[in-house]
């Protein structure tokens, strides 16, 4: 891997228009389970499968059961940024990284200091009343019992994209604009199996693609450099100059 790391270091040194596209594997090194690994949420057993519980239909039909699962499995508020999050924030501060595009909802990129983050699937840290629109912090959801209810009597919903819901057009537009400007695209910690999010990398404007993931992905053949290793381990060894 040393030769691959040296190549990545050189490409980062030479670039001032990097975009990072990441998935669940970016946060697993912070202790947050992903969905599709051997010990991820999809391999665990519940009365309903996770993808059904995390659907808009299920939320509307049985919000109390939704929140029982959501508080237990989706709120990981003790997690802290790892080497990947910190290095990306450092690259942005150095003027080399245009932005981060993430499929994660944990807010760890912002906790590490990243400013320009396109959260494709929303964030657990934002919650709103479906009746009056008032926003509530994540602690409101965590500390409530049963269905979190706004002062107006409306149900509070996490500002996360559930199954059956569309992505935010403003977020998509911002991510696409950054991808079109990028000269180096680093993809990390994602199987590139979730659509429409994974399809966004087709908007990359040109230059080099680096793919860092522990397991193969459908896009490996399109990458100029593939590093089969944990993203935090790889980016943690990069020096920002």
Image (spheres, grey):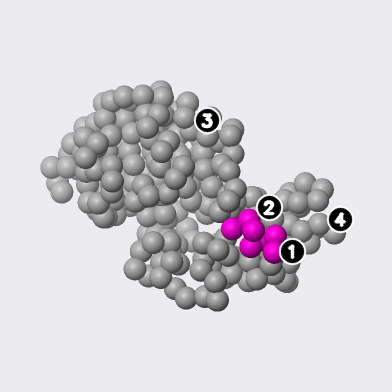
Residue ID for mark 3: 174
Looking at the image, residue 168 lies above or below residue 79: above
Residue receiving disc 2: 127
Q: Is residue 113 shown to the viewer in this render? A: no
Q: Secondary structure at mark 2?
A: strand
For marks 1 and 2, give the CA distance: 10 Å
Q: Which callout, 1 or 3, points at the residue further toward the start of the chain?
A: 1
Look at the numbered disc 3 and give the secondary structure of its residue.
Answer: helix
| As drawn, 44 above or below 196 | below
The span shown in magenta is 55-61
Residue at 85% x, 59% y: name it: 153
x, y percent for residue 1: 15, 48
Residue 17 image-quadrant placement: top left
Image location of residue 230, percent across then percent down = 29, 54
- Mark 1 to mark 3 CA distance (whole Å): 31 Å
Query: Of marks 4 and 2, which one's residue comes earlier in the chain?
Result: 2
Residue located at (28% from left, 34% from top): 209
Q: Describe the element under mark 4 as helix, strand or loop.
A: loop
Label disc, if present, on residue 148 of the rendered structure: 1
Q: Residues within 10 Å of mark 4 (few under 14, many from 20)?
A: few
The Cα atoms of the two marked residues, 4 and 2, are separated by 15 Å
Q: Contact, CB < 8 Å: mark 1 with mark 2?
A: yes
Residue 212 painted magenta: no
Per the model, the C-alpha gap separating discs 3 and 2 is: 22 Å
């Amino acid at each position: 891997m040393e030769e691959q790391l040296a190549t990545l270091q050189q490409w980062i040194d030479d670039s001032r228009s990097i975009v990072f596209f990441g998935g669940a594997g970016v946060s697993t090194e912070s202790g947050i389970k992903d969905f599709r690994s051997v010990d991820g949420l999809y391999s665990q057993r519940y009365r309903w499968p996770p993808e059904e519980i995390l659907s808009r239909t299920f939320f509307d039909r049985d919000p109390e059961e939704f929140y029982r699962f959501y508080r237990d499995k989706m709120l990981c508020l003790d997690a802290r940024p790892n080497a990947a999050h910190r290095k990306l924030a450092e690259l942005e501060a150095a003027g080399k990284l245009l932005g981060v595009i993430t499929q994660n909802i944990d807010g760890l990129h912002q906790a590490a200091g990243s400013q320009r983050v396109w959260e494709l699937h929303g964030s657990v840290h934002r919650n709103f009343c479906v009746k009056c629109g008032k926003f509530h912090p994540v602690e409101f959801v965590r500390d409530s019992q049963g269905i979190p209810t706004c002062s107006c009597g409306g149900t509070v919903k996490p500002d996360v994209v559930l199954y059956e819901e569309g992505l935010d057009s403003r977020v998509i537009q911002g991510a696409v604009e950054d991808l079109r400007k990028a000269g180096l695209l680093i993809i990390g910690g994602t199987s590139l199996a979730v659509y429409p999010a994974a399809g966004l990398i087709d908007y990359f404007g040109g230059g080099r693609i680096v793919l860092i993931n522990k397991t193969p992905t459908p896009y490996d053949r399109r990458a100029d450099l593939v590093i089969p290793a944990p993203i935090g381990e790889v980016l943690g060894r990069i020096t920002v100059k």
